[in-house]
Amino acid sequence: MSAARSTERYRLQPGGAVRGAVRVPGDKSISHRALMLGGIAEGDTAVEGFLASEDCLATLAALQALGVAIERPQRERVIVHGAGARGLRPAAAALDMGNAGTAMRLSMGLLAGQPFDSTLIGDASLMRRPMERAAVPLRLMGARIVTQDGRPPVRILGGSALRGIEYELPVASAQVKSAILLASLQASGRTSVTEPAPTRDHSERMLAAFGVELTRSARTVSLEGGQTLRGAHVEVPGDFSSAAFFLVAGCLAGDGLTLRNVGVNPTRTGLLELLRQMGADIRVRPLRGDARASTGVEPVADLEVRAGPLRGIEVPEALVPLAIDEFPVFFIAAACAQGETVLRHAEELRVKESDRLAVMAEGLGRLGVEHELLPDGIRIRGSGELGGGTVDSHGDHRIAMAFAVASLKARAPIEVLDVANVATSFPGFVELARTAGLRIEALRSALGSG
């Protein structure tokens, strides 16, 4: 894992209940895309509900370094003055994407057809993550991209004439699909991307909101290159991946918990179906459907959840890509359910901010949960209750927050190490969790051997 470790940790007292109404920060995936598409659009783009996390601020800073004028009159309101398709300028230094894999992979597509060279770097965790799955199709389009043994730094050599391709993704990945679609805007001819299973479709929805004509049929999306984007008004809903922690918390110890204004794009909400299969009491109250294209056409709802008994399940393969970012907290639900839960076909979890299968298995073991780590998944034997102990998140924000939720069903205190990266996706997590009812405090001190 990363040699650079934070001295921040969480200390959680066992038990408690969550109740009331909470509103999670804006959607990270949509915030990234709104900035990027706004940057290459003609005219201004107003982004309301922007996620002011370290990941999204890294994208904002990178676009500014590329010559895009951006204002932030309020913390969650951003005005992007579009530079147009050919208005980006070479950055004076490498573009630092921090911990944001989405920002790096999408930027590869955004910059693939530009007339200047660019270099993409990130923090220690991001510099270990694989980038060839995005680089390979971009090279087929004519881009010149150089990685270091398949990982960052990523060098994009300018001046390439891109051409449209037909590409079948070998692994379902919204980030790779989006990188190809961004590059296709600069390409000659038509580009088609076919995915083996549905993945989040924020890019397709938002491209349409910016005036791009594209076609979608079954698992294929296609568009003609050279189209002009027009500035749009984007309303960013609450991030479902952030709401997931409170959704599971409500299933475990909820006394009438409502999550307000959450994005419920059906390509993101696999966790909802998984929890319902486990017997969870969750109600979805839609706030708007696919109306007002200027918002990015994202469906939004209030989610109401109450605690009840959960049972173990076998995760359907079709739901794996629709819940890929939520599996860390799903594993906590599985550990607190009665019976066995089995996940397979989830190799993608091994190349996230950490090897999430291995790190979650390690943490579950620390809390006394019986489990078996599989090459492509995990088997968890739930008992309805967890022990206490010290868990190392290995700098992975979603794992840190997942084990915070575990405290609701713990018999003893839990301490979660190396939690600074929670700020990359969920600023204010501790305060919101405490307001909802978790017995959590954030501490900073020198780390021992753990």
Image (tube, rainbow, N blue to C red):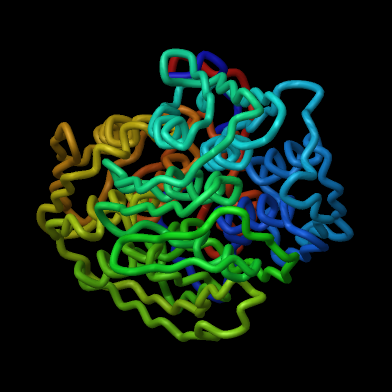
Q: Position of residue 220 (x, y in %)?
A: 34, 60
Q: Position of residue 19 (x, y in %)?
A: 50, 72
Report whether 197 appears left or right of 174: left
> Would residue 266 be found to the left or right of residue 204 on screen?
left
Q: Quadrant of residue 139?
A: top left
Q: Which x, y percent locates residue 109?
A: 55, 40
Residue 18 against residue 133 in the figure, above or below: below
In the displayed structure image, the side of residue 296 where residue 265 appears, left or right: left
Given residues 257 and 241, the one toward you in this image is 241
Is residue 130 left or right of 163 when viewed as pictured?
left
Q: Which residue lies most toward the front here?
A: 189
| Residue 240: % across, % down | 48, 63
Q: Is residue 121 visible?
A: no
Would you place residue 45 above or below residue 192 in this image? below
Residue at 62 percent across and 51 percent down: it is: 32
Residue 53 seen by the camera = yes
